[in-house]
Amino acid sequence: MQKRVFTYHYAILVLIAIGLIFSACTEPFSPELLPEAESILVVDATLTNEIKHHEVLLSRSSQEQGKLQIEPNATVRITDDTQQTFTFSETEPGTYISDVAFGATANGRYRLQITTSDGKAYTSNAEPLPPIGQIDTISTERTLTTTGSEGVSITLDSFDPTGSSRFYRYEYEETYKIIAPKWGPDQLVVLSEENQAVGIINRDPEKEERTCYATDNSISLILTKTSGAGDDRVSDFEVRFLNRNNFIISHRYSILVKQFILSQQAYTFYEKLKDFSGSESLFSQSQPGFINGNIFPDDDSGERVVGIFEVASVSEKRAFFNYSDFFPDEELPPFIDECRPNTFQVGGNPSVFEFVRSNRVSYTNSITDPNTGSLQAYIVVPRVCGDCTVIGNSEVPDFWEE
């Protein structure tokens, strides 16, 4: 089953819809004043030139304390100006995936059509595919910010010789290697529930717990535009800054940057969305107001729809670097846990048994009597310090390069 993906800008769209309902109150915000009549449709839909199964997310602002309501059982399709239709199926409530893989083409114009389970129909404006441009280079550099933070700056260059791109949005997916700092070849296991006994055994060699990989997506709107006069060139544009104390660059790091070329309307929409996301309080008495998109009810009722049907050309480029490339022979960034050791006496109170049974610790060492050699105590650390699978996946990504 396709997993529902909540992008950063989709979360902001939901907040806008909730805010619009709250702002309908004539008094300062109070949950008791929430109108019961209006429920606003929220749409997150992007069609690109990539040949893939595209996704549409639908929800509504809820009348129950401003919570998100998934919009299930809708009919979703995209049509082009030749009346070719691409249908979408609901893979889980509110998530609609195209039945076939397809991509927007240079000469087409596309409309998103939605019919909800109660029979209400919505249609977007017809949108063309913007020019297709490529990211030329991704550069990484050790840098010091104006505020005194030292780290790695990731920038890109892009150029459209036709001068027709102009409006850009960026997303990134970062993947990083994790090495458990307190991993050891042995582990503690429960030997007897009845006797609350534990024992030390060798780790399963088939189960990788020392080296893992984790992936995160960008959580901000990254926008830029060119003047349109002369070269349509994006130069030395920073898409990510990583503080040298960020543990995700401790070993090897990779970033996949996606460049979306937008229409002016889509760019303006995202600009306003970005301004909204920076507002101090969603529920302040000074509301940012409705952000016009390009999706409207078919019955001309004036019902508000939050969101935009974005048709964008996309290109992508990946880069890798090691921490040692920029900080050779320097101390690694602090791990996400201090990994302080705890010592549990054998037969003592508290017992290490409950921690082992609930899989909360990793074994690092033992204390034995120097005269008799008998086991006296176990030394353990939080599980994440000795088992990377707590925060990552031991499977090496297909694209990974060392």
Image (cartoon, rainbow, N blue to C red):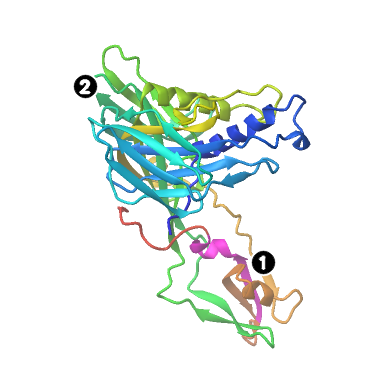
Q: Residue at x 52, y 50 (%)?
A: 72
Magenta residues?
376-390
> Where does the N terminus fall, quadrant-wise?
bottom left
Q: Residue at x 26, y 30 (%)?
A: 133
Q: On the image, which quarter does residue 170 sit in?
A: top left
Q: Secondary structure at mark 2?
A: loop
Q: Is residue 386 part of the magenta span, yes or no?
A: yes
Please tell me whether residue 140 is drawn above or below residue 287 in the rendered image. Answer: below
Q: Residue at x 46, y 40 (%)?
A: 218
Kind of residue sitting beneath label 1? Asn
Please tell me whether residue 200 is drawn above or below residue 82 in the rendered image. Answer: below
Residue 392 pos. (x, y %): 47, 58
C-alpha distance separating marks 2 and 1: 62 Å
| Residue 142 can be seen, yes or no | no
Residue on which disc 1 sits: 342
User: Which is nearer the N-term, disc 2 or disc 1?
Assistant: 2
The numbered disc on residue 161 is 2
Pick whichever, 284 or 218, lies toward us.
284
Pick whichever, 73 or 332, lies toward us.
73
Pick whichever, 140 or 340, lies toward us.
140
